[in-house]
Image (cartoon, helix red, strand yellow):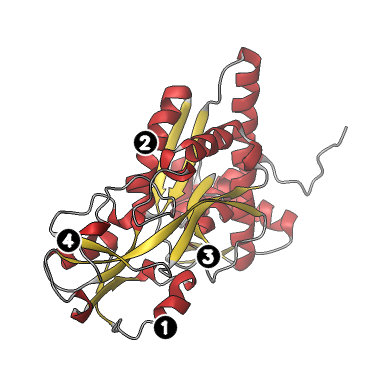
Amino acid sequence: MARTTDSDLAPHELRVLVAVADTGGFSAAAGTLSLTQSAVSHSVRGSERKIGAVLFERGRAGARPTPAGEKAVAHARHILRLLDVLTAEARGAARSDAAEGPLRIAAFRSAALHLLPPVLQRLRARHPGIEPRVRIVREVGRGTAGEVADGKADIAIATLGGSVPLPPGLVARGLFEEPYALVHAAGHTAPRSLPLVDWAENCGSYTRDWWAAQDWIPKATVEAEDDGAVLALVSGGHGMAIMPALSLAGAPDSVDIADLGPKRPTRQVGYVTTAELAGSAVVRALVRELRADPGVTGSPALFGTVSTPTVTERSARSSP
């Protein structure tokens, strides 16, 4: 049987590292852990001694993880989560129960609003012991996958195939291809003459080549915070936008949606998790429900033959 050594970090030391990183200081971490500040400081110094690296920069403003600290904290979150999964699954197996325990999900805004609700409803019905916790994360930079890499989420609903590579240690699987469409104020006779309204999450590399080839698309004159704000601006007649299908789910009647043709751009939506958590009961349960969604498995698409989550068919209203 393997034995611990003086260089091994104990679970309580890992929790201290995570608490300091999350709260930004030793005093705040002490409060969340019901410890004294000196106990937290002693624990961090002990961890740094065992690892052989400074994990936090101390200052008047608090404590900030060093590059070594960021790595240590991310691994600490993963290890603590696996310990939670070990306990939950062992208890479930002993009682022959279904999957149970918390399930941390990171999702970009339109997926959280339009894809997850029916999925989570079915998940709760089949596995009442699972406690889904959804966090909305902007799909820019490391995006939702970064939340999994940092140990802040068990699974992420993410856009795949972009310019940012998947962090090491993660696995990704596609769910569906999501088409883009032109959206503009209802009844406008020349939508391509309108200024462009855009938002940061819409600038993925999966559409860049198509976008560059469209000489009719101007540079964005209005940049909104998210796709909901884009729809509101377009609805008010402030411009047109090129948007993916999930962002157009439940679009108001004050906008028209036009198919961009057979060479329209698409993006792949899928999920990302760690190799270890991919086999956990809670993650496997969610993946089953994601794949069981009628939109994912081949229901009529919003703009033709590409399968997307069910969205009201409106592409016949106008032509680009």
Tell me if residue 143 comes above or below residue 103 in the rendering.
Answer: below
Q: Quadrant of residue 54?
A: bottom right
Give the mark toward the camera: 1 or 2.
1
Q: Secondary structure at mark 2?
A: helix
Q: Disc 2 or disc 4, which is closer to the eye?
A: 4
What is the C-alpha distance between the residues marked 3 and 4?
A: 53 Å
Does 92 sit above or below residue 10?
above
Pointer 4 residue: 255
CA neighbours of label 4 inside 10 A, class few (<14), some (14 to 19), many (20+): many
Give the spatial CA distance, label 2 vs label 4. Answer: 25 Å
Q: Residue at x 62, y 15 (%)?
A: 96
Which mark, residue 118? Answer: 2
The residue that label 3 is drawn on is 58
Are the residues flagged by discs 2 and 3 in contact, CB closer than 8 Å? no
> Which sits in the foreground, 189 or 84?
189
Q: Is 220 on the left-hand or right-hand side of 135?
A: left
User: Label 3 sits on what residue type?
Assistant: Arg
Q: Residue at x 40, y 48 (%)?
A: 135
The first of marks 3 and 1 along the sequence is: 3
Q: Residues within 10 Å of mark 1 (few under 14, many from 20)?
A: few
**Quadrant occupied by the C terminus:** bottom left
Report the residue marked by disc 1. Answer: 213
Question: Residue 318 — which label?
Answer: none
Q: Are marks 3 and 1 in contact (CB under 8 Å)?
A: no
